[in-house]
Amino acid sequence: MPRNAEGEYFSRRIDLTDREEVGERLVNARKGMQIGRKIGSVIPLGGSAVGATLGAISGFILGDETTVFPIDMIAIPAYQAYLLNGTPAFQIFIKEGEVLTQVMQTDAQEAIEAVSDVQNTPTTKKRRRSKWNVYTGKKANQIRFKSGKKKGLLNLKAMGVQYRKANKGGKKK
């Protein structure tokens, strides 16, 4: 838990407009959920569900890039988290007040970054519509077939004649 110089706990609000921060917190919530589910599976009748819920909530709340440890802790490898009795492969002793900072990006963070890079690529400028496209787009200029196989479709030949008359242009030879 972050503390100031006087030793008082402080916190800040989650910036929901920052997609990167929200994405990191969701990834941490998922990790917390998985760990909570494993730990809760020891308790019968809904222990996994309760553990997953509590783990997801704590992963979302504590999902900052840096973590200040509030008490002395012992860390063991994640693949041995199920060990309640027994000795893990190795242990790391963490003193109160030490800071855990992320050194490398996780696969999920790299994927989020790659997706955001693709989404932020500049879009090509739309081409300007020609006079003909503008003319045919206006409902008042549209001439439709009244009967036959093409009933209801645009009569582009008749529209072309009207267009050339309106723009004083004929076919150039």
Image: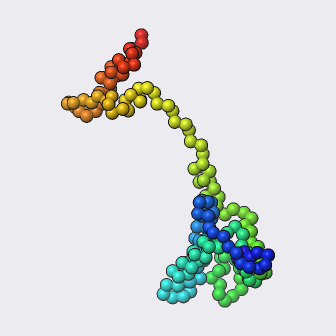
Quarter of the image with the C terminus in it: top left
- At x 75% / y 83%, what residue is drawn? 72
Question: Which residue is drawn at the image coordinates 72% and 66% (left, top)?
Answer: 102
Q: Evaluate whether residue 82 shows in this view.
A: yes
Residue 80 image offset from top left, x and y in percent = 66, 79
Where is residue 52, by image quadrant? bottom right
Viewer-side residue, 82 vs 1:
1
Residue 4 at x, y = what percent? 76, 75
- Closer to the camera, 77 or 115? 115
Could you tell whether 114 is left or right of 133 in the image? Answer: right
Q: Residue at x 59, y 43 (%)?
A: 122
Which one is in front, 19 or 92? 19
Work out whether residue 89 can be spotted: no
| Lateral position of residue 101 relative to residue 25, left or right | right
Residue 64, image quadrant: bottom right
What count of labels does the image hold? Answer: 0
For residue 123, which quarter of the picture?
top right
**Which x, y percent locates residue 83?**
65, 84
Single out the residue that lies furthest toward the left: 147
Say which residue appears at 59% left-offset and 60% top-offset. Answer: 17
